[in-house]
Each structure stands twice: as structure tokens, then as C-alpha cells.
Amino acid sequence: MARRAGRSGAVDDRPLPPRLPSVPPSGLQRLDLADVADGDLSEVELTGSLPDGFDEPLHLREVRLTGASLVGARLEASRWIDVEVASCDLSGADLQQSALTRVSFRDTRLSGCQFAGSRWHDVRFEECRLETVNLAMAVSQRVRFERCRMAGADLRSAAFEGVAWWDCDLTDAECTHVKLARAQLHGSTITGLRGASSLRPVSVDAEQFAALADHLLAELGIEVTSRPVD
């Protein structure tokens, strides 16, 4: 996919928002997930919880998920295009090998969610809970995490092009072999980060320098100590 350039010629990595249909003031048709007969849905607003035993990909196009519960849902290889997710709970949902394009998540819980091997384009998370989320081997372009809780996140061997973690909690995140291009970590907590030497190239705040330097020195086996006394 070609990179977008701003007026200054710099690459514009802001995720594109979902393209939802023009609707009357009453909004999109509302549908309870409990009434879903199959996983192909478009131009609706989804609420409620999936029926017991639902076990198939969820293919969504031009959809809002509002106050919905997908806790522990098995949705491997789903495809979401132009989807807005707000105040939902996807804790422990299995979305491995899924494809997300122009998707936004706001005030949503995704703790323990499985996104391993997924592919993302233009995805934004705002004030979401992503503790222990699994993003191993995911591939993404233009992704932004803002004010998200991501302690213990697994980013091993993931590839991010045009990514920002702004004011996030990345305590104890696993970053071994992560691949980055145009990445930002401004304002984020990086205490206990593992595999910090893979986080390059990356932009950080001056306040983050000491913590990142400690991680890098530890990985290289370098200790800062006082000179021994003869």
C-alpha cells in the first residue's frame, strides 16, 4: 500500500477513520448479536452478546459495535472493514489471523485478546484495556494506541509501520524481534520492557531516555557500578 504524504512531504501515519454510511438521524439499524444467524453483517449497529456456541469468522462492513460483548468469542480469520467499536468487551476473544481495515476502538476492553498473525491497516485504539493482548507476528500499517493499558502485551515478531503508542502503559511488554518503521513511544511507561533492543528505529521523550537506556544496557550485560576499592 502506498504511503500517504502530507503537505510538507512527510509521511502521514494518522489512521484513516471508518467510513460509515450516511444514515438518517435515527441512525443505523440496530441488531442484537444474540439474533445473528451468520457472521456476514453490513450497515448495522450491533449490541448485546453473541449466541452460545457461535464459532465462525465475523465479517463486518460499515458496522458500529456499541456496548456489545464478545468475551471469549472464537472469531479466528474474521474480516472487519470500516468498523467503529465503542464501550464493548472483547476480553479473551480469538481474532487470530484476522484482517482489520479502518477500524476504531474506544473505551473498550480487549484484555487477553488474541490477534496473533493478524493484519491491520488504519486502526486506532483510544482509552482501551489491552493487558496481555497477543499481537505476536501481526503485521500493521498506520496504527495508533492512545492512553491504553497494555501491561504484559506480547509484540514478539510483530511488524509495525507507522505506529504510535502515546501515553500508554507498556509495563512488562514483550518486544523481542519486533520490527518497526516510523514508530513513536511518547509519554508511555516502559518499565520492565523485554527485548528493548528490537525497538528501533523509534522516537521517545527525553523523560523516557533513562528507562530505555537501562533496558538496553541490561540486555548487553553492561552494569553501571562504583569502582572497587583496593
Image: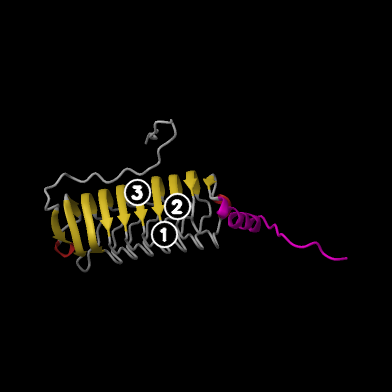
Assign a secondary structure to mark 3: strand
The residue depicted at 82 percent of the width and 64 percent of the height is 228
Comparing labels 3 and 1, the label whose residue is closer to the camera: 3
Q: Is residue 184 above or below residue 112?
A: above
Of marks 2 and 3, which one's residue comes earlier in the chain?
A: 3
In the image, farthest residue toward the bottom: 52
Name the residue: 39% across, 49% down.
144
C-alpha distance separating marks 3 and 1: 16 Å
Of residues 79 and 187, the one nearer the viewer is: 187
Residue in front for this viewpoint, 10 or 117? 10
Residue 222 lies in what quarter of the image?
bottom right
Residue 142 screen position, x and y as percent: 39, 44
Which residue position is annotated with label 3? 123
Q: Amino acid at mark 3?
A: Val
Q: Which residue is mark 1?
A: 134
Instruction: Find residue 57 and report its horizontal and vertical position in percent.
Output: 26, 56
Residue at 19% across, 52% down: 40
Q: Position of residue 172 (x, y in %)?
A: 51, 63
The residue most toward the right is: 230
How many marks the image carries: the answer is: 3
Magenta residues span: 206-230
The answer to whether 30 appears left or right of 227 in the picture is left
- Judging by the rendered image, the residue that carries numbered circle 2 is 165
Q: Earlier in the sequence, mark 3 or mark 1?
A: 3
For discs 2 and 3, the disc positioned in front in the rendered view = 2
Residue closer to the observer: 202 or 53: 202
Please name the amino acid that badge 1 sits on.
Asn
Q: Quadrant of residue 207?
A: bottom right
Amino acid tagged 2: Trp
